[in-house]
Image: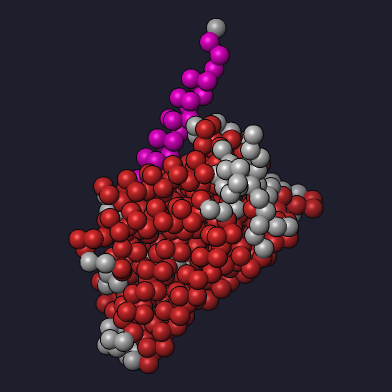
Amino acid sequence: MSDPHLARRLGLTDAVLIGIGSMVGAGVFSAFAPAAAAAGAGLLIGLAVAAVVAYGNATASAQLAAQYPVSGGTYVYGRERLGDWWGFLAGWGFVVGKTASCAAMALTFAAYAVPPAWQRPVAVVAVLALGAVNFRGITRTARLTRILVVIVLVALAVVVGVGLLGAPTDVRFPGEGGLGGPGLYGVLQSAGLLFFAFAGYARIATLGEEVSDPRRTIPRAVVIALAVAVGVYAVVAVTVLLALGPDRLAASSAPLIDTVADHPWAVPIVAVGGAAAALGALLALIAGIGRTVLAMARHADLPPWLAAVHPRFRVPHRAEVAVVGVVSLLVLTVDLRGAIGFSSFGVLAYYLVANLAAATQVGEHRRFPRWLQVLGAAGCLLLAATLPWQAVVAGLIVVAVGVAYRALRRVAARPRP
């Protein structure tokens, strides 16, 4: 019989890079356009708001992961601190929302890599290939993440250098003339959309069962990865706003490529960076969803046969195969590249539970002041309320489906008289 636990093979550097690879991923190539449509140049304020909320959430996740260093992230924390239903809601929102994000990332990769006619089959190949990497063990996932992060950072350096070199000087930034047309609501909506980009630090917590010295490593890795991501996003945001202006940025389907369009030598570099960013996000997502599915299956909130751990590679192989299969099906049937709002709703619900759970911790398990969890929870509610209404409705429907699913499973599992 195989060991039901995963192996602790990740050090601080690996954990940080997985977090960076999740955050400095496809979001940096795609999230600025819808944020600019919502807030114009006010997206910079939205970015700051998203970063503050993300920091509150990150400290909650880090504090909880140090006490509960097992796979599953907030699904486990919600169950342990608040009760079974809270944990289920967090896990369900994460799995469904991030599965849609996987399909979006696969299609985004294909959009950068091949002509339109080849995009769906190439996206499926990417999902299968990264699923195979994850299947071989978490250390191989970490090694590939290192390579992808370097490629992405080089591409972003090219964007910043070229963009600032040729940027006009007549862009009005927030504070020079008020928030302008979009107002406070537009800024908050941009923050909710940009929050999508910072959600990657959850991947570190969901891998808690595979991190060495988790009580020390996870809190440090989460804070370091988030700090790097915020710095990168801020520099890139200023660059694309200066280079394109708010209106062109809002209308762009590939804003970073448009930023370097006048320099033909730079376009393929940025395109490769965009493809690598999508692959990095997809790689981390498959790993994170697989571990959450594993945790939910252990408690029978998903089919228990998904709780198996491979005896050699020490990965949740059945869970990952199931995730890869569902994502491949989505890639072939629907286009989810516009799923940023929906994913943001699921992630905000996930972190709302994390903040509420962390607020109950006391004594030696409390590493950060409780007001950070209050700030994080309030921020999650506020940003969720200001997302596009379609995203909110879709998110509420998903929550309702999950509640009905678990209620039916509980009824079916009751002993018959």
| Image position, residue 371 (x, y; %) | 66, 58
One can see residue 50 in this view? no
Report the span colored magenta: 390-416
Residue 329 in magenta? no
Q: Quadrant of the N terminus?
A: top right
Name, please, the residue furthest toward the left: 117
In this picture, is 270 found above or below 304? below
Q: Which residue is pictured at 38% across the width and 44% down the height?
A: 325
Closer to the camera, 166 or 128?
A: 128
| Image position, residue 199 (x, y; %) | 50, 59
| Image position, residue 316 (x, y; %) | 55, 44
Q: Is residue 8 left or right of residue 132?
A: right
Closer to the camera, 343 or 353?
A: 343
Q: Quadrant of the C terminus?
A: top right
Q: Which residue is pictured at 25% across the width and 71% down the height?
A: 251
| Quadrant of res 29 | bottom left
Name, please, the residue furthest toward the top: 417
In this picture, is 319 found above or below 247? above
Closer to the camera, 118 or 224?
A: 118
One can see residue 221 in this view? yes
Q: Which residue is pictured at 46% across the width and 53% down the height?
A: 132
Figure disc tally: 0
Name, please, the residue furthest toward the front: 312
Residue 401 in magenta? yes
Q: Is residue 248 left or right of residue 376?
A: left
